[in-house]
Amino acid sequence: MADNYTTPLARAARIMEIIIPCYMFGKSWGISDSKTVDLFRAMFPSFLVNMAEFFKGIMHTDNANIQRFFSTVSGAFVGFMVVAILALVMHLVLRDRKYLDTLRFTSVSLIPIAVLNGTLSHAIKTLVENMGTQTPDALYASTVSSSQGNLALDGLFYLTAMWFLARRTGVKRSKRFGVVCVGIAFMAVYIGIGLMISPAEWQALLPKLQQALATH
Amino acid sequence: MAGASAQTAAGVSHTLKGEHTMKIPAQRFININKYAITAAIIVYLYGTFISKILQPGILFALAAGFFCLFHKEYFLSRIKLAAHIWAIPIVVGLFTYPMLMEKQPSGQNGFYFFLTFIISFIPYILLITGKTVEALAKKERLGIISFRIMVQLAVLLIYAATTSYSFIYGSNVALFFWGMFHVLTVAILPFLFGRVLCGWLCPNAVLQDALFKNLTYKRPIPTLPRAIDEQSHSSAMYISGEIDKNAPYFPFTLLLSWFPMFFAETVFDLTGVLEYPVYFMYGLYLGSLLLPWRKMCTHFCWLSSYRGLCAQGSIWRIRYNRSKCKFCKKCQAEEACPFYIDIRNQDNEMPATCCLCFSCMEACPFDGVITFKRAPEDKARVKAIGKKAA
């Protein structure tokens, strides 16, 4: 069985398993534009969005489509860095495989959080599109507050996926608890450093957002 | 086939190696003029790609009609009932006509609506006029399969209705459908019901079953390169039980197919575009014409990947009891399984690839071989294997 892993397709699959979830995970941090960048900074940890903005600044073009591509690649690059750091911590817990395999494990298990990030960025898009059609409070409730459920659900399934993936790849039960603890710590840090827009942030952002939308 | 079989007017007496004798009720298969079907497909494709005004809801309902036609076993011998069920698109058409006209009043729309209305009759007429033939049944229809078919059709019609409504009124309700679909099938279902998405819920899978399963035309790509087919033996998504920590989790082709999807979405900002999921579905659907049935799902559908990986610990599983198997080969992969799993090669239980369609369970003429519950002797054997591995 192990021989199959050295086939060109198997080797390529192992690399893609790192790239694709990282892309999914991080792309939301890079897709903001001048109208929505403040909202993205409030919705996601601001330094991640700022890093993505920095890379976007390096790869700049006037073509809107290509710029969108560069934007997501910038976000994906930041996503890769976050996953690489998280994998380092995970590697200390797992210790039974190469770093590359830990990185794959970390990256694939983050797919529910990538889905969460996508949902949150979609919530921002909906919020901007519906500005003016509802009162700001109602808009906040229907887009941002309703995403709290997704946060809880995707967080739960991130931990579940991690547990099952660890079990499948032969991680001992005692170590699996360690793996899940890393996941819980990651979620705590991710939320702690500024995931989701708080009501106070929303109140502060509202005039800026209205002004930005009026000028565009 | 090992053994003898005899057919009677009342039922089929099926004997295998003289060990088991079972009565299987006779079943009537529908035999439909192949030219009528070909013509219907051409009209269907024309409606989809040339005259975009045709209501997608009607088209999907039509596809579901074909689903019933080609799956000869569906609705058993009650083809008249099946015909009446497919009068639903006609009724839907009548109700949606005022909506369409209110939104886009023009003579051309009236013409296309009339065309839609007429082609809605095609499955109805085919079923009513189809001749039936007595044929050897696999086994009496399992209740769970009837239930599965109902769920498939219900999800397909919800999809059709939301898409139709969105097209007519320009609302985002179809995107809401896809949003909920993804959240449910990524987050909840794989852990509980495995890859139930692929067997029960996916509209594309239903359409593939509808049009391609029983078509015997020569596929433009009848076989895939060996390297691609062999991926299924070396990735965690397909292997049951514990895997090597170095093993890839997903097949390469499947991962590769994520890229065009993501890049197109990003570069052309397609996330909120209503037509995008519909035309994407049709793209997949036409791509499936080139390959053997469900090979598209097996090797190129990115939706199945994460679901397959997480399904390993799912609660609802099919068990194969080797101790009771008569090795009659009725369940052999090419005939029964959408994912080409040969259940006889599964020593323990079905791999995560299993989409819980229960086709193998129905294909097996014996009781207790493919079940939900492991037989005591197999339980002991599996336990012994586990101990040996530890």
Image: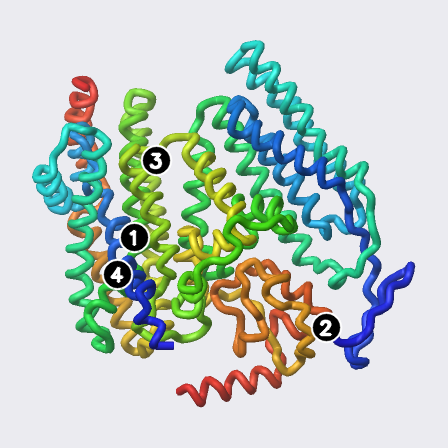
Amino acid on which the number 2 mark rests in the picture? Phe
Within 10 angstroms of label 4, few (less than 14), some, or many (20 or more) residues? some
x, y percentage for residue B21?
82, 75
Residue type at numbered disc 4: Ile
Task: Kindly check if marks 1 and 4 are in contact, taking CB atoms under 8 A apart as contact.
Answer: no
Give the number of the mark in front: 4 or 2: 4
Which callout, 3 or 1, points to the residue nearer the camera?
3
First of labels 1, 4 by sequence position = 4
Amino acid at the residue labelled 1: Ile
Q: Quadrant of residue A129?
A: top left
Callout 3 amino acid: Thr
- Residue at which label 3 appears: B271
Q: Is residue A142 visible?
A: no
Subunit of mark 4?
A
**Gap between marks 4 and 2, in whole Å?**
45 Å
- Do the residues indicated by labels 4 and 3 lie within the same chain of the protein? no
Whole-angstrom CA distance, mark 1 to mark 4, is: 20 Å
Q: With respect to residue B300, does A92 lie above or below?
A: below
Dot 3 or dot 2: first in sequence order is: 3
Q: Residue at x 52, y 48 (%)?
A: B220
Foreground pick, A91 / A9:
A9
- How many labels, in total? 4
CA–CA distance between discs 3 and 2?
49 Å
The residue that label 1 is drawn on is A113
Horizontally, is A17 left or right of B277 in the view? left
Q: CA distance from mark 3 to mark 1?
A: 18 Å
Chain that bears disc 2: B
